[in-house]
Amino acid sequence: EEYLEFITCYKNEDSYLVLLDIYSNLYKIFYIFSKERFWKDVWPKFKEHMKEPFKSNFSRLGWETKRDENINDKLLRSLAIAYLSFAEDKEIIKQCISRLNSRIDPDLKSVVYSVAASNGKPSVYRRLLKKYSATEDNEEKMYLLISLYKTKDKKFLKSSLGFALSKNVRDQD
């Protein structure tokens, strides 16, 4: 309780490292308690508790990298998208899924693919598989392969494991 109260002091924070630490700690709290019966009553308030710094930073940064942008902002954009997705921000999730059909900033591919996979329908999963087969870029293949394991659907998770062990994926991937 004291920690949650303390971090409200960071509502105007724009440091990637500070917000990464806060997100990491909030995720640990989520991971520990999310299977408890009381969690469904706590989750709505919990996910909103520290949304403000991530939302305001994302509003400031947007989806596209700016010319001569510093590394803190590049990293912060991706972190804000990840946190807002974790907090079930419907607009961020919708945008990640829709961006699968267009050019994705290279700095955002990992987070966009992961958010889309963890929140998408079967058609999104199939689109990610298709993208994996279509790309020659090994880094992008890794992002796509990792994202396939983020699905919440057990059937697709099993399918992802089978895909990873198939001839379609190189052993080193």
Image (cartoon, rainbow, N blue to C red):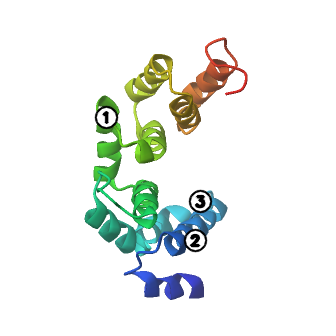
Q: Which residue is mark 3?
A: 34
Instruction: From the image, state whether disc 2 or disc 1 is nearer to you.
Output: 1
Label 2, label 1: how many angstroms apart (C-alpha)?
Answer: 30 Å
Label 1, label 3: how many angstroms apart (C-alpha)?
Answer: 35 Å
Q: Which residue is mark 2?
A: 21
Q: Position of residue 134 (x, y in %)?
A: 45, 17
Residue found at the far right of this picture: 171
Which element carries disc 3, helix, strand or loop?
Answer: loop
Residue situated in front as seen by the camera: 65 or 56:
65
Number of on-image labels: 3
Q: Position of residue 125 (x, y in %)?
A: 45, 27
Indicate whether 25 appears above or below 164: below
Amino acid at circle 3: Ser
Amino acid at circle 1: Arg
Q: Position of residue 22 (x, y in %)?
A: 54, 72
Q: Is residue 66 left or right of residue 108?
A: left
Amino acid at circle 2: Asp
Q: Which residue is mark 1?
A: 103
Instruction: From the image, state whether disc 3 or disc 2 is nearer to you.
Output: 2
Q: Is residue 1 visible?
A: no
Task: Name the quadrant of the N terminus.
Answer: bottom right
Point 42% across, 42% down: residue = 106
Badge 3 crowding class, 10 Å Cα cut-off, few under 14, some 14 to 19, many 20 or more, is some
Badge 2 crowding class, 10 Å Cα cut-off, few under 14, some 14 to 19, many 20 or more, is few
**Disc nearer the start of the sequence (1/3):** 3
Task: Name the quadrant of the C terminus.
Answer: top right
Instruction: From the image, state whether disc 1 or disc 3 is nearer to you.
Output: 1
